[in-house]
Image (cartoon, helix red, strand yellow):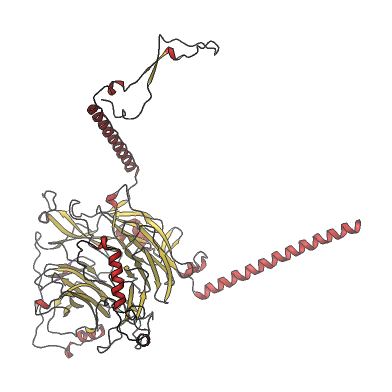
Amino acid sequence: MSSSKGSRKQRPSVFAKGPLEIPSPTEADLPKDDEKDFDFWDMYQELDTLPLPYRMINKLVNLLFDYSWEVIEEREALREIEKNRILPTTYPPGAEIQLNKMPGGMAVSQDYLFIGGVKGFSIYNLHNFKRMYVWEKLKVDVISIWAMDLGNEVLIIPVDELGIVRLFYLYKDSLFLLKAINEMDDISKQSTCVKMELSPSGDYAAFLLQGAGDIWLEVYKLPKETWLKEVEHPQFTLNPKKKTKQLQLSTPDSALTESVETNLRPSLSPYAIQDLNICFKTDLKLSPPVYVMKIKPPKPIAGTTFKSPLEIFSKVEDYCGLGSGQNHYIKDVQWEQHMEIFNASYKKYLEGEWEEEPLSTATFHFFTNSISPIPVDAKSPPGAACILGIRWTGSHNFSLYSLNKNLKDKTDCENVWPCAAPITVSQISSSSSYLVLACEDGVLILWDLAQGFLFGVIALPEGCFCQSIHFLRFFLVHEGRNVYPEVQVKYEMMCVVLCTDASLHLVTASRTTGPTSKVLVERSKKYPEETICTVASVPALPGMVLIFSRNQSVSLMDVAKSEIICAFAAPVQPVEAMPWKPLFVVSPHHPYFLLHGVHPNDNATPTVDAKNTTDSVFCFNFDDYPLLKDISKNCTISQKDLECNQAFPQVLPLEKRCEQFLQKSFQKVARTQMKGRDQWAQLRKYSLVLQKENLKK
């Protein structure tokens, strides 16, 4: 049997007859080669004499050796690359909150951390990580939770395992239950909350509910001004039959209950709030949210009921619903003929069993009154939401509904933005200024909602389809540093797009230049374990995003340089467990983020069993790390410095930009005139020289 290189073709060996001699130094004395003086010997002659089965086995073994050698060389090359690879600095967490069970969601406000748990939720002081209160009144656990600041008050919205959503109001040291939105006495009529959304100012809430084979969206107005008056003047709404009920926290057991690690340094913020003895009050009944409207999925397009085209024009006379496709003049017979042709053409593809299509779900966003995509009769307060935008699964249309409605008004969409392909992802910026619609064909549609202006349409690279969109606050690169302008810049949009192939793209758009796309991270073929699974923007660090990878690593990327700045280390679940779905929350108010992690108990064998692990919430404060502290503390640039710098004209006020434009125009005209004068002077001088020569002749 030959060696691993034996499968490669080699020339037959040639041997000279007789003894070898030293050749003469002169070319003339060299002997002439003759074929008779040489013998040809085939190295594979012995193998060829073997029977056919043995020769086949020999070839297969040689192929196996060659393939193994190629694998060895590839692994050696990867090992060399790994040795020369520069790994980023890894920072440990600054604080840890130990839990007795995996948290059912996390949410942060200005001063509090809310963690869903067993039969309720817990409230923590966000500055020292001490648990302040536990509300445990449910029969099942909380699986998700939201929180929003309403001035100095906080609105808390947990959802339990039954899909029941409840609204709580935290005012100073008092916690109030406002309403259970979808709780029913009859369990057969019970609906579950699939998704919810709050308006940026907290004046509206929308809940996507599902039940009895149907799905719908309910919109409520939140009377936050009324709540504040009722808690500040409780004598007008106090119910004397009920007494204040306060839950006292027992001394926590280190083995079963939650505790805060004291050996870590939780120096989150210099602003400390006083620990309050929060109590749950039932003697004061606050006003419930006000029901606004109920929105159902659009009906399938069917045959027309109109008898003449004039009825259609009268139906869309006020432009409401124009573009939805519901108002047409196609009859049932035409639809049936079209379906027959379609079924006959694609019969072989339609045969067989088909899975039942799931219920259509909705993604919805609140728009503030800084935009007016549709005419509204009533005026909303500044900053309040006035438009609700909805897209349904598989739909080409993005529908707009006015929130200034009465219960007697019809729930019809006032405007429709149709797209060429079904919309798969939609995202609105935190300030409700920009909107991005991602279509099924990989096209992104970018809108400036504040001005009602379309930035443009851009297509992602071939084979890339949008999975999620994350907006970034507009930043500049000044002297090699990412900085935020002191004044908010208009007509400039930035967002990070994560695609289904795990590639990451930076999309920017401007009113003057149009949208552009830049690849930040390509799908890693050499390191599949580093495939990106989730991305999150970091408001405290300009131009930075958190990247969560499949190997349960967390890194910070600078999108301007497409470089990894650092990494964050926290114990997480074993890699052998289910695919990692990171549970985290990034604070919009402070320079840190919180991450749920799991680490094995002391003297426990490494296993995925939940009994041998401890759930914790780890806090990473950027100010605790010297590299990031400098970025966080010096993240803005003054307007005066920008006005002195001619490299950023897009951040200047309109008057200043016009002034610079006029100055450049005048300078250009002056240079053109001076150039023309110089050319005229040279031409005149040349003509005088010619005249003198002619006179001499």
Instruction: Pick whichever, 308 or 162, lies toward us.
Output: 308
Q: Position of residue 360 (x, y in %)?
A: 24, 71
In the image: residue 488, left or right of residue 248: right
- Magenta stretch: give its range: 129-140
Q: Position of residue 53 (x, y in %)?
A: 22, 28
Q: Position of residue 195 (x, y in %)?
A: 22, 72
Instruction: Pick whichever, 287 or 463, lies toward us.
Output: 463
Q: Which residue shows up at 29% across the image and 38% down it?
A: 71
In the image: residue 352, left or right of residue 342: left
Relative to 82, residue 395 above or below: below
Rendered-image quadrant of the C terminus: bottom right
Q: Which residue shows up at 84% across the image and 58% down it?
A: 690
Report whether residue 365 is seen: no
Instruction: Pick whichever, 543 or 269, lies toward us.
Output: 543
Q: Which residue shows up at 31% across the image and 39% down it?
A: 74
> Is residue 49 located in the magenta-colored stretch of the structure?
no
Instruction: Pick whichever, 223 or 373, lies toward us.
Output: 373
Rendered-image quadrant of the N terminus: top left
Q: Quadrant of residue 115?
A: bottom left
Relative to 533, residue 399 above or below: below
In the image: residue 289, left or right of residue 679: left
In the image: residue 172, left or right of residue 468: left
Q: Which residue shows up at 13% across the image and 55% down it?
A: 613
> Is residue 139 located in the magenta-colored stretch of the structure?
yes
Relative to 17, residue 432 above or below: below
